[in-house]
Image (spheres, rainbow, N blue to C red):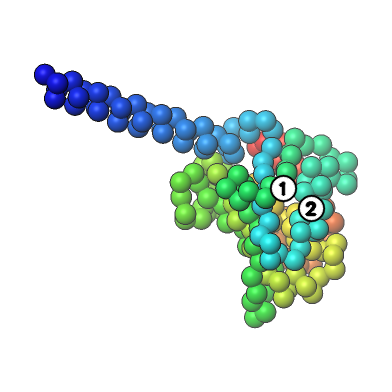
Amino acid sequence: MRLRTLKNISCFIVMFCMFFSSVICVKAADRISWNKKMISGGNILYWVSTDVAYASNIRAAETEIEIPAAGYKNSMKLSKTTEKKQSQMDFYQYSDANSSTVAYTYSYQAGSQTPMNVSDKDKYDWQWCKIELNKPLMNQKTSERRTVTCVHEMLHAYGGKDTYSSDQKWSIMYGRSDRTATGVTSDANAFLNEKY
């Protein structure tokens, strides 16, 4: 009888732990939700690796997204954290002088270590993202253009897609280096409001 009671109690504890852990995962996955408005607007934490040379540009990009210089309004709120485990947006740098790519942005679903395809970001929620800045190419830019690059990449993290149409060079999401945007543009601000 004691053995059976002990088995029942053990079974209950295991099932309770499984249920509790699944509830935690669901709540964590809801921190950044793509298919519905984010809880608390666009309030997320970002972390910058200590070797990144562009912390001031990242800070300026944060300000530009929150309060666009063009006068647009959105609900985004970004805050820097020193605790990487709390971050939903991580910044790194790398060096590849032979590349023409200034930066990369990778987004991940909850519990995944495989980057999402850009086409999936309208269909699935993302949990966190990683932005990598190519130091040799970033160093060739003025401080203002470095900030524009950071804004562009951060908007990729939120789901913004590149456009390569030559009549859209004005857009912050224009994917070539000859874009004319100096900050958040109307198209980018519209999708931030739509999704967040």
Mark 1–mark 2 CB contact (< 8 Å): yes
- Outermost residue on the left side: it is 1
Give 63 or 14, whichever is nearer the viewer: 14
Residue 100 in picture, x, y percent from top left: 67, 74
Residue 149 in picture, x, y percent from top left: 75, 61
Q: Would you say 32 lies left or right of 140 here?
A: left
- Outermost residue on the front side: it is 2
Residue type, numbered disc 2:
Arg
**Vertical arrangement, residue 91 with respect to residue 78, above or below:** below
Residue 165 in picture, x, y percent from top left: 72, 60
Could you tell me how far apart the alpha carbons at marks 1 and 2 are, in whole angstroms?
8 Å
Identify the image quadrant of the N terminus.
top left
Give 87 or 100, whichever is nearer the viewer: 87
Mark 1 falls on what kind of element?
Answer: strand
Residue type, numbered disc 1:
Lys
Q: Would you say 146 lies left or right of 28 here?
A: right
- Compare marks 1 and 2 and give the one earlier in the sequence: 2
Give 109 or 55, whichever is nearer the viewer: 55
Residue designated by label 2:
59
Give 49 or 189, whichever is nearer the viewer: 49
**Vertical arrangement, residue 70 with respect to residue 54, above or below:** above
Question: Neighbour class for label 1 at 10 Å: few (<14), some, many (≥20)?
Answer: some
Which residue does the image show at 82% across and 64% down from the upper left?
Answer: 145
Which residue does the image show at 59% across and 32% down from the upper left?
Answer: 36
